[in-house]
Image (cartoon, rainbow, N blue to C red):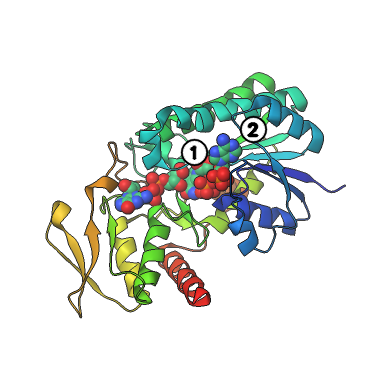
Amino acid sequence: MTKKAFITGVTGQDGAYLSEFLLKKGYAVFGGYRRTSSPNFWRLEELNILDQVELMEVDILDTGNLIRVFDKVGPDEIYNLAAQSYVAVSFEKPVLTGEITAIGVTRVLEAIRIVNPKVKFYQASSSEMFGKVREIPQNEMTPFYPRSPYAAAKLYGHWLTIDYRESYNIFGCSGILFNHESPLRGIEFITRKVSNAVARIKYGKQDYFEVGNMDAKRDWGYAKEYVEGMWMMLRQPEPKDYVLATNENHSVREFIEHAFSAIGVSLHWKGSGVNEAGLDSKTGKTLVKINPKFFRPGEVDQLLGDYSKAKNELGWEPKIKFRELVEIMVQQDLERISRAK
Ligand code: NDP
Ligand code: GDR
């Protein structure tokens, strides 16, 4: 019989790639989206799968809604990807972030417990939970130290998944995923902000862009590979938690430099602190400026993931690493702009 998967947060980056992956595996894919005044289906459209995903109105702020929808669909697997996922905004909207990103997980788990506790459940946990890191690299046993309302909310969801597994025997897996990016990444996140701005600069659509802390380091992988890891977790005999990462980290500064080198521009840096700027080595034009508004009240300085457990138990391994990822993203933004011309 055709397997049914339900994805909350289907309109997001991972929701789109996971839908595509599960459709290829022969699943009937049901996607939860929240009502907004204008629909946000551009990712599903870009992947050409909008007509293949059964879209349903779902808000993880509403338990009754979740219960009715799960009851109607009868999914075999539920992937909880919905979240207020932007760390910077979580400092401005800590209560809303808690409601969606933390308590939202309780609502989904309660709905599962009521409708069908045999459902397999994936929770989108995050490397942000390691925050002010206690050891390098970080693995499933590393103590957590969340540094933002977002990270604290994700930690709640992470523990709740473990608690429901232990208390009610729910097959709940928590994927501790390090940053994963792609051409479908939201424009507010640094990688896509940079790839989009660099492509626009190349086409003369803008002169420069502004960023915050360029010294933060992240372990950046390719989203398309990470959604496959989510599915693999639900195939294991026992539900467990797994880190997915590349075990390489790079600074925001390096990301910017590589993005410019993908369009043949070499950058050099001048000045320091908020007065630092990135200049085109040939023309001397300022292409990158610092704006203090992009600094966060609490920063995560560096993340580096050890994915050995996923490699040994799931057979999961990242193939696309930093340089290729940056090139894929810049290339896609160049194509988008040239198509729109
Ligand atoms: P996105 O921000 O692209 O997508 C988040 C999704 O959640 C969107 O579909 C959004 O809907 C939806 N959503 C937000 N609030 C609600 C709500 N109240 N009810 C229902 N849906 C809601 O995130 P990603 O795809 O990048 O990430 C997927 C998940 O993985 C998130 O939980 C994120 O926190 C987590 N994660 C992501 C990592 C990454 O590097 N990408 C790393 C580790 C964890 P809408 O389109 O309407 O805004
Ligand atoms: P992050 O991603 O916080 O790691 O969370 P983001 O791309 O927002 O920030 C990464 C680092 O870049 C620094 N930075 C800037 N960030 C943004 N967005 N905009 C800027 O202008 C800028 N300048 C510097 C940040 O300070 C930070 O250090 C992402 C999200 O997908 C989470 O949902 C997920 O859980 C984690 O990754 C793993």
Whichever of labels 2 and 1 marks the residue nearer the N terminus, that label is 1
Tell me the element at label 1. Answer: loop
The residue located at (16%, 52%) in the rendering is 274
Q: Amino acid at mark 2?
A: Gly
**Residue 196 in view here:** yes
**Left or right of 208 on screen, residue 316:** right
Q: Amino acid at mark 1?
A: Gln
- Disc 1 CB within 8 Å of nearest ligand 1 atom: yes
Tell me the element at label 2. Answer: strand
Q: Position of residue 278 (x, y in %)?
A: 21, 65
The residue furthest top is 167
Q: Residues within 10 Å of mark 2 (few under 14, many from 20)?
A: many
The residue located at (73%, 52%) in the rendering is 53
Asked if the residues shown at circle 2 and circle 1 are in contact, with their CB atoms under 8 angstroms apart, the answer is: no
> In front of the other: label 2 or label 1?
1
Query: Circle 2 is placed at which residue position?
Result: 172
